[in-house]
Image (tube, rainbow, N blue to C red):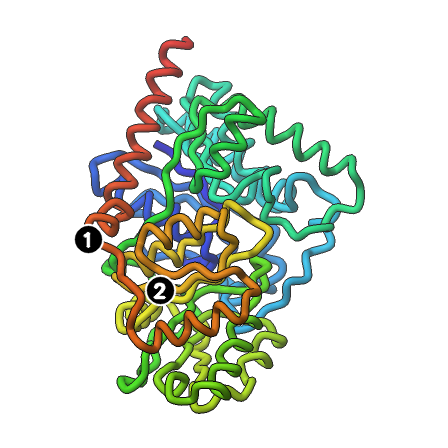
């Protein structure tokens, strides 16, 4: 198999987690897997041994030629899009990375003769690599970590013309319609593909994985902060503004709880670990005593996992505009066995999974209900996920499901020939 993934370790982007887990467990289950990815984020010592191929990427110009990719692992960031993102459809990687990835994939196919290629998006332009190999007889699985035209991950209003939106929709229909199989992370995306495009997408959700053997992302702290053993520690890991997520209601609810019920508030600490905008860092300085807010910084994967497994509960903040929202961090909280407090729209994939795990779901801007939920958390009255649920979202099981999809695509491709 060939796995095409622009985001891959040592990239610190959340989008690297799924392809990294798939690669690790597909190889562990005996599949001969080659990974094709970008060189923009650096390299790993085991690349040659594992068959990881990194291609040129014009994105590297942003890091001034740094070979470490450290420019992509900052503790703070801006959500301002690159100017090319307003012009190119479906994404700027169609210019920055696709030409190099497509050429490398065709060369690797001549050398190794793949049975199947899995392309994972975003960026959506990665799927052109799958289409190119399918024309040469390779079975193709298109894996969507986010919707494409359905609740797209791109910022609202990014494209200035309706023609760009129509072109994006046509590309989605044309490319995904050619794939032998399509996999998605959440049920809302699967429903959209079935109803709007007639594509019978298969659900292979994100999952959780132990940290052993995972690569360390350069430029990120590997020490998790010490939590206050006298408090209930509610931990958020990830980014906010990049996904249109807002922590202000949570901070406001915590401040109100501190004024109205200080005995409950003094039992709480909220820990934010990740890269945050300057505005978010300012928000975290809001007075909430006797509760407290801790900013842990941008941690590496091992430190994040250690922090999650030492916490008392996990905080999920989802965008209120996206039904498909689940987030890879949700499954890491499940893997850590944490009770979960989620700010999410009630009809979202995240809300369904959190409820299944016994957690609490509150509307993204419902401060009164959120305040009561924080008091419930302080009293230790939120349930934790069951062992059976944790097992169903473990990456070894999910990799077997993806392998079954790939084997079905190969059989379909063989029948087509």
Considering the image in quadrants, where does the N terminus appear?
top left
Left or right, residue 28 beside residue 299: left
Q: Is residue 233 above or below residue 13?
A: below
Considering depth in this image, is 90 or 173 the residue closer to the camera? Answer: 173
Q: Residue at x 59, y 59 (%)?
A: 244
Considering depth in this image, is 251 or 372 the residue closer to the camera? Answer: 372
The image quarter containing residue 202 is: top left
Mark 1 crowd level (few <14, some 14–19, many ≥20, 10 Å Cα): few
The image quarter containing residue 91 is: top right
Q: Residue at x 26, y 36 (%)?
A: 400
Give x and y (percent) for residue 61: 62, 58
Disc 1 secondary structure class:
helix
Mark 2 lies on residue: 301
Left or right, residue 318 beside residue 224: right
Disc 2 secondary structure class:
helix
Mark 1 lies on residue: 387
- Label 2 near label 1: C-beta < 8 Å? no
């Amino acid at each position: 198999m060939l796995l095409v993934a622009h985001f891959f370790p040592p990239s610190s982007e959340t989008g690297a987690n799924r392809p990294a887990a798939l690669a690790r467990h597909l190889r562990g289950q005996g599949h001969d897997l080659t990974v094709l990815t970008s060189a923009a984020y650096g390299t790993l010592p085991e690349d040659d041994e594992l068959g990881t191929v990194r291609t040129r990427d014009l994105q590297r110009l942003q890091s001034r030629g740094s070979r470490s990719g450290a420019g992509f692992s900052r503790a703070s960031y801006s959500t301002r899009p690159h100017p090319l993102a307003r012009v190119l459809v479906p994404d700027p990687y169609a210019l920055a990375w696709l030409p190099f990835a497509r050429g490398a994939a065709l060369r690797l196919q001549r050398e190794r003769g793949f049975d199947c290629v899995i392309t994972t998006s975003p960026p959506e332009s990665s799927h052109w690599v799958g289409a190119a190999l399918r024309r040469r007889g390779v079975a193709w699985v298109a894996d969507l970590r986010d919707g494409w035209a359905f609740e797209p991950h791109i910022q609202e209003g990014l494209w200035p013309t309706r023609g760009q939106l129509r072109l994006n929709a046509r590309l989605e229909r044309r490319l995904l319609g050619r794939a032998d199989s399509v996999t998605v992370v959440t049920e809302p995306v699967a429903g959209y593909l079935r109803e709007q495009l007639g594509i019978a997408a298969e659900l292979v959700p994100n999952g959780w994985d132990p940290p052993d053997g995972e690569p360390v992302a350069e430029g990120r702290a590997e020490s998790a902060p010490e939590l206050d053993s006298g408090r209930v520690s509610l931990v958020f890991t990830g980014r906010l503004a990049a996904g249109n997520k807002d922590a202000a209601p949570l901070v406001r609810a915590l401040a109100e709880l501190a004024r109205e019920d200080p005995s409950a508030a003094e039992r709480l600490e909220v820990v934010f670990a990740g890269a945050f905008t300057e505005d978010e860092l300012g928000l975290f300085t809001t007075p909430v005593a006797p509760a407290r807010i801790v900013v842990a910084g941008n941690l590496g994967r091992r430190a994040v996992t250690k922090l999650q497994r030492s916490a008392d509960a996990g905080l999920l903040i989802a965008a209120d505009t996206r039904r498909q929202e689940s987030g890879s961090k949700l499954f890491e909280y499940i893997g850590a066995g944490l009770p979960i407090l989620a700010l999410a729209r009630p009809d979202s994939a995240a809300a369904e999974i959190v409820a299944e795990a016994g957690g609490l779901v509150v509307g993204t801007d419902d401060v009164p209900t959120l305040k009561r939920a924080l008091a419930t958390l302080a009293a230790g009255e939120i349930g934790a996920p069951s062992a059976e649920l944790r097992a169903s979202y473990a990456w070894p099981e999910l990799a077997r499901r993806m392998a079954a999809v790939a084997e079905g695509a190969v059989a379909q491709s063989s029948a087509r020939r």
